[in-house]
Amino acid sequence: MNSKKSPFKFIVIITLIVIAIIVALIVISNKSSDSDSEEGKTFDNQPSTEGQPTYGDTDAPVSIVEFGDFMCPACKIWGENFFPQLVSDYVDSGEANISFVNVLFHGAQSELGSLAAESVYKQNPDAYWDFHQALFNEQPSEGHDNEWLTREKIMEVAEGVPKIDTEQLKEDLDNETAMDEVNKDTKLVNKFDVKLTPTIMVNGTTIEDPFDYDEIKNAIEDALEEGK
């Protein structure tokens, strides 16, 4: 006994396929919009670097800002590979400077490291970057979320930086004298909607991929061209 396929059934199947395609396109479009909103943002004003640790000429036409966390392994890698390259290509020539803004994404240890770094900067700005790098160097290659960024580790690192008064640092940590600076950084993190570390901004524009040196370089070159 032969049976004919119902035209109605065929229409229903086609309709369902069309609906599925439309839904898929909407989802893809929404994801794309979300991605665009989170990456490559350009703000009307760049983060203020007044009072922030800044490497290079503070009057340089291009401001590179790293939002980083001493507990973040990606920040350690960025600092080891990209910071010195930027210094060589743009900072030494006076075309750009680099500032560091603390991010507290890893809780109490992030806060302690930031407090220590800000205390060192307040005590002696010339000692800051040596301490900054030395503290990142102590970050373990494995188990970075374990408790390693302690007061003992901070003092050990500080003792290896000749320009730091360790007794003053102990007192500053006890009294949390630089907490206002740490809180100021947190306000910047919120204001500029920082979600990941490291987040790199060049004259107010967020770099989509902080590990794409060409993207960073192009942003700097564009900023230099705009400033002419």
Image (tube, helix red, strand yellow):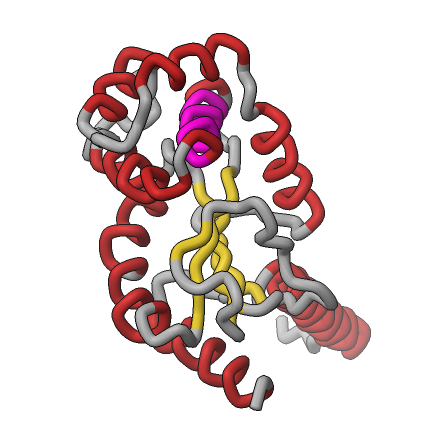
Measured from the top left, where is residue 117 in percent x and y? 41, 31
Q: Quadrant of residue 44?
A: bottom right
Measured from the top left, where is residue 101 in percent x and y? 51, 44
Relative side of 86 to 11, left or right: left
- Camera-side residue of 37 and 62: 62
Residue at horizontal 35%, vertical 43%? 126
**Residue 112 is a magenta residue:** yes
Chief SS of the magenta region: helix
Quadrant of the drawing holding the N terminus: bottom right
Quadrant of the drawing holding the C terminus: bottom right
Q: Is residue 143 above or below residue 217?
A: above
In the displayed orientation, state which residue is furthest to the right: 8
Measured from the top left, where is residue 14 in percent x and y? 72, 75
Q: Is residue 87 above or below residue 99?
A: below
Q: Quadrant of residue 11?
A: bottom right
Total marks shown come to 0
Measured from the top left, where is residue 111 in percent x and y? 49, 24
Q: Is residue 213 above or below residue 76?
A: below
- Camera-side residue of 215 and 172: 172
Relative side of 95 to 162, left or right: right
Q: Is residue 194 above or below residue 140?
A: below
Q: Magenta span covers which residues?
A: 110-121
Residue at horizontal 39%, vertical 12%? 170
**Residue 35 is a magenta residue:** no
Residue at horizontal 42%, vertical 25%? 116
Relative side of 39 to 14, left or right: left
Residue at horizontal 39%, vertical 55%? 55
Q: Quadrant of residue 39?
A: bottom right
Q: Would you say residue 24 is visible in this rendering?
A: no
- Camera-side residue of 25 and 81: 81
Q: Would you say residue 88 is visible in this rendering?
A: yes
